[in-house]
Image (spheres, rainbow, N blue to C red):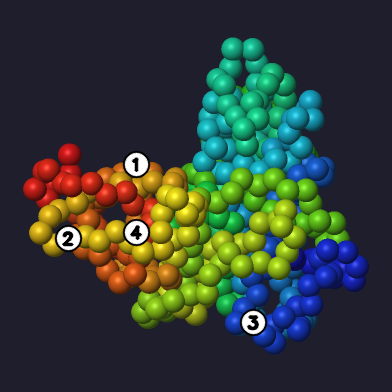
Amino acid sequence: MASNPSGATTGWAASYDYEALADYADYLMIMTYDEHYEGGSAGPVASLSFVENSIKYALKKTTADKIMLGLPFYGRLWSSDGRFNGNGINLTKAEDLISDYGATVTYDSSSGSMKAQFTVRSGSAANQVGGITLKTGNYTLWYDNETTLAKKMTLVSKYNLKGAACWALGQEPVSLWKNYTGYLHGTTPVPAITTSVSSQSPSPSSSAAPVSSSKPASSAATSSKAPSSSKAPASSAPPASSSATSAKSSAPTSSVPPASASTEPASSSAPATISSSSQQETVESVPAVPSQEEASSEAPEVDDDRELIGEVKWTSRLSLLYMPVAGAVIIASIMAGERLLVLRKVGRGWYKVRRKNGEEGYVESRFISLKDNENNGEMA
């Protein structure tokens, strides 16, 4: 649901009755992002003050155990020629642009966000964002990395919230998962921003400090939507390839309500990842859904008398889970095209699989194509 950091009483943000919705919902996944959006002026996707004020508003309407903080696993791109006007970009692609064009990267201390500025010149590497080719000219990119995301995550423990949600799994800095639980609980220190002089002459705002000549201070890897206080943004953000639920407790939960449901306009993107501070870290894989012709809801049978190799399809990443349930602990992220040894079918719509490195777990069968294994239990 939309965030309302300024307490607006009219417009899109004000259309959500937090108090009434909380009476009927287990929790409210608040999109504490898109402070700046496609079609608007350039600026951070979710400044710390924007996020915190959104939480404070929600706490006036319901209790902390009903509130899920939204994390933006994406950035937004603006260009001097106007062809890009806040277009959504996943953080993996953002890192590619920063590297390819030798961007001047700065940490904007007033917003707690990362900002990259670069120039595409004739003969530069060719790149596209959302199917649009970057032409020669100047560009500004606002985004988050592990450090700035971690700072937002500490608000979960500060206000004792239910947890955190994201748009969207597969677009985040991979390194974030190493300390994800610690950031939520506030037990792991937030990584410092490493300050260094950029190789290019920066033109950041007065509050921004240069941090790198080609990459943000902490490693990043992996886009989206929600408006400011009263204006609904134009649609843009790249769709998520998968979604997840992440939480903390003594044992994995057996199920988690789907994170894709939303009451916002069709042009907006709801949070896709849930992280609860009162339950164990879990991840629900919800990759791009195949068409009716491509897959059925029933998993293809796995014959005990023959071994099969499965290959991940349709999605850029698929979660390998600890248990065959939506909401199980994540073991690893599997990239599209990876081959897996399928050990057996489990229940409705799940396979138990083994990776080449020996890791075993469960994946949704609808995202796996099967063929006979001719390598006697080993992958080619």
The answer for how far apart the CA atoms under marks 2 and 4 are is 14 Å
**201 and 27: which one is in front?**
27
Where is mark 3, residue-wise?
25
The answer for how far apart the CA atoms under marks 3 and 2 are is 42 Å
Which circle's residue, 2 or 4, is located before the other in the chain?
Answer: 2
**Image quarter of residue 25:** bottom right
Foreground: disc 2 or disc 1: 2
How many badges with numbers are in the image? 4
Which circle's residue, 3 or 2, is located before the other in the chain?
Answer: 3
Which residue appears farthest toward the front when viewing the image? 293
User: Which element is circle 3 on?
Assistant: loop
Q: Residue 139 placed where, x, y %?
A: 71, 30
Q: Is residue 71 visible?
A: yes
Which circle's residue, 3 or 4, is located before the other in the chain?
Answer: 3
Where is mark 4, residue-wise?
365
Q: Label 2: how many residues lie within 10 Å, few (<14), some (14-19) or many (20+)?
A: few
**219 and 353: which one is in front?**
353
Where is mark 2, residue-wise?
303
Q: What's the residue at 69%, 19% (across, down)?
A: 136
Q: Residue 258 placed where, x, y %?
A: 53, 70
Where is mark 1, residue-wise?
337
Q: What's the residue at 41%, 59% (across, down)?
A: 296
**Quarter of the figure with the N terminus:** bottom right
Do tag 1 and tag 3 residues touch (Cβ < 8 Å)?
Answer: no
